Image: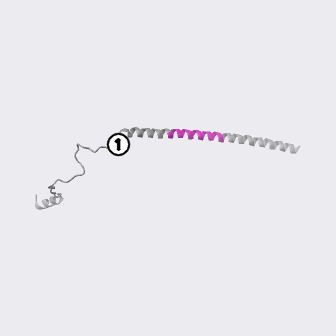
Amino acid sequence: MNRIANARLASFRAPIRAQPSSPTTRFYSNSPSTPPKPSNYTAFYKTFGRPIAKVVLTAIFTYQLAYYAWTRLEHKEIKEEMLGLTATIAELEARVELLEKAKANKTKT
């Protein structure tokens, strides 16, 4: 290799650090033989996380389904009441017309 190529490669290489001569105090361990113990909360949710989520989601789905059915029935009941009121109004209007005709006939005679 020529000198220019060597100079370019040298500029991309990371500098080599000297190893410490004395051991330093470490507050953590990198050894894989002693993994950190998970907390009680972590262990609980690792074990029961999925079942709890399934129960909660099933409960929400059931509630929404029952709510939808209830609103559907309420809407149907209100509609039937409105139709009943319409029929009652039509009956009363017919009765008023009959009474007006009877009154008109009475005043003519």
Q: Is residue 82 left or right of residue 40?
A: right
* Rendered residue at 62%/39% (across/down): 77
Q: Label 1: which residue?
A: 40
Q: Quadrant of residue 97?
A: top right
Q: Quadrant of residue 88?
A: top right
Classify the position of the N terminus by image quarter: bottom left
* Rendered residue at 60%/39% (across/down): 76
Question: Principal SS element in the magenta part?
Answer: helix
Q: Magenta segment: does it hold 105?
A: no
Q: Is residue 57 above or below residue 23?
A: above
Residue 80: x and y, percent? 64, 39
| Along the viewing direction, whichever of 7 and 46 lies nearer the viewer | 46
* Rendered residue at 65%/40% (across/down): 81
* Rendered residue at 75%/41% (across/down): 94
Q: Amino acid at mark 1?
A: Asn
Residue 65: x and y, percent? 51, 39
What kind of element bears circle 1? helix
By what rule are the colours in the image chosen? one colour
Q: Is residue 68 left or right of residue 15?
A: right
Classify the position of the C terminus by image quarter: top right
Residue 33: x and y, percent? 23, 42
| Along the viewing direction, whichever of 13 and 36 lies nearer the viewer | 36
Q: Magenta segment: does it hold 70?
A: yes
Sort mark 1 into few (<14), some (14-19) or many (20+) by Cα contacts within 10 Å: few
Task: Identify the magenta region.
Answer: 63-82
Q: Quadrant of residue 20?
A: bottom left
Q: How many marks?
A: 1
Residue 91: x and y, percent? 73, 40
